[in-house]
Amino acid sequence: METISKELPSKEPPSFVKEYQCSGCVSGGDCFEKDLDSEACIKHCAGTLTSFGSFFLGLPKGFCRTGEPKVIIKIFKTFHDLEKTWKYDKFNVPVWKHLNKTNHVLIRGLSPRINMPFLHIVLENCMSQINCLEISDKDIKDMD
């Protein structure tokens, strides 16, 4: 008789989830549960509060505010992975893109039909594949 062993999913988040999500999460870093269609943690809850509301501690200005309704974060290893579940069109409109120091692309957008903001993080430089306004480091520095 053959024994079948099933490995339980890791509760240890990948380094990019720790950087972008765990640093400001009220759930802590030991509760990682991978999203079904991205690399993000679905248990993430932005817990840093200020007079303008909650924000994502690990992200730069312009990409950190959760807003109302709350921003959904999706993390993709490649732009190809993003395209498997999202299509940028009139229903999912990328507005800003920013290439950070770790060569990851942050994309802030809106799904206007359902009034849902989104934040996509792609763990590669795919700037040329995204048609929207590019936000520079200077733009981020000059934001409130």
Image (spheres, grey):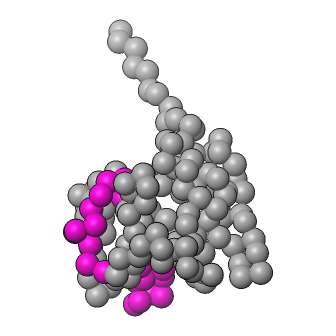
Q: Quadrant of residue 61?
A: bottom right
Q: Tell which residue pokes out farthest to the bottom in this image.
A: 113
Q: Is residue 19 left or right of residue 23?
A: left
What is the count of numbered marks? 0
> Is residue 91 something that shows in the picture?
yes
Q: Is residue 90 shown above or below 30?
A: below
Determine if the magenta segment contains residue 5. Answer: no
> Is residue 37 something that shows in the picture?
no
Give the x, y percent position of residue 76: 37, 56
Which residue is at 57% across, 80% downward?
A: 143
Q: Is residue 23 shown above or below 47?
A: above
Which residue is at 37% across, 54% downward?
A: 103
Give the x, y percent position of residue 22: 62, 51
Which residue is at 65% across, 41% downward?
A: 30
Which residue is at 55% across, 63% downward?
A: 59
Quadrant the N terminus occupies = top left
- Please state which of residues 15 and 62 is positioned toward the viewer in this rendering: 62
Magenta residues (range): 107-132
Q: Is residue 33 shown above or below 58?
A: above
Q: Tell which residue pokes out farthest to the top in this image.
A: 1
Q: Is residue 88 shown above or below 82?
A: below
Determine if the magenta segment contains residue 109. Answer: yes
Quadrant the C terminus occupies = bottom right
Give the x, y percent position of residue 33: 54, 48
